[in-house]
Image (cartoon, rainbow, N blue to C red):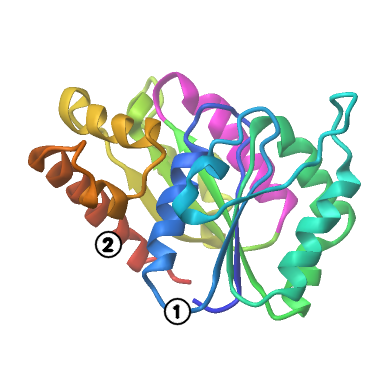
Amino acid sequence: MHNTVHFILQGKGGIGKTLVSTILAQWMAGQDTQPLRCYDTDQENPTFSRYKAMNVRHVPVMTDTRTIDPKRFDTLMIDLLEEEGNCVIDNGANTFSPLMAYLLENDCFDMLKEAGRKVYIHVIVGGGDTLHDTATGFTTTAKATKVPLVLWENQHFGLLQSASGKQFTDSLTYSEYAARVVGRVVLSQRNADTFGADIKKMNIARLTMEEVRASDKFNVMEKQRIKVVFRDLFEQLDKVSW
């Protein structure tokens, strides 16, 4: 991984964008010694910026009148263009449309490519009641851009299948852009009383996996289950065609 830029984009809130950002950042941190820079553009719930171990920079794009000024994304773009290293950008539902408009209007994806950056967009599609909205978000994002996509399948809300049992990855919605998908990562549906509770505990504390491993607030079985989850996700990320 060298000079890569990773945007986590999905217009629906509460679908796991920050979780994906933290997982991706931790995996990237273990790949090489190139600097890793993390950014949080969420103006209402900047959760990613609260992970102190990741040194996440909050990008303040909201004005005193509680409106978003797209020009304030300039600071982020200048940093991405001028600083060496790999970057992860978490995006809130409240800044999805302004950020997308900014990136497209200013030809930012081409600018980054010309500057030697390799850009990826990570799109989360959820199951159950979230499938329709997040599938629409996948289509909107894929249609508007030409960069490689990484699909994150979040099974926390249920399996990614329609009422007829058709899988999202077998749908026409997905097939139209499947050639651009360089990898898929499944956030598997696990026992909510054990794995789910442990991951929730880790997220509430805003801790990384390494911090959990060193913490005396997690018992040996909680640490083991978190290790199992991250090992699975890291192995999936290893298989992405970066």
**Residue annotated with mark 2:** 235
Residue 109: mark in rendering: none
Please identify the quarter of the rendering in which residue 110 is found: bottom right
Query: Is 129 on the left or on the right of 179, as rendered?
Result: left
Q: Earlier in the sequence, mark 1 or mark 2?
A: 1
The residue at the point 65 percent across, 77 percent down is 84
Residue at the location (77% across, 42% down)? Answer: 60
Most frequent secondary structure within the magenta stretch: helix
Residue 156 vertical position relative to residue 139 in the rendered view, above or below: above
Q: Looking at numbered disc 1 in the image, what kind of residue is underneath it?
A: Thr
Over which residues does the magenta segment extend?
A: 127-145
Determine whether, in the image, residue 160 is placed left or right of residue 1: left
Residue 165 visible from this viewpoint:
no
Residue 75 lies in the magenta stretch: no
Q: Nearer the viewer, residue 214 or 227?
A: 214
- Provide residue 85's location: percent of width, then percent of height: 59, 74
Could you tell me which residue is drawn at 80 percent across and 53 percent down?
103
Q: Secondary structure at mark 1?
A: loop
Badge 1 is on which residue? Answer: 33
Label 2 secondary element = helix
Q: Amino acid at mark 2?
A: Glu
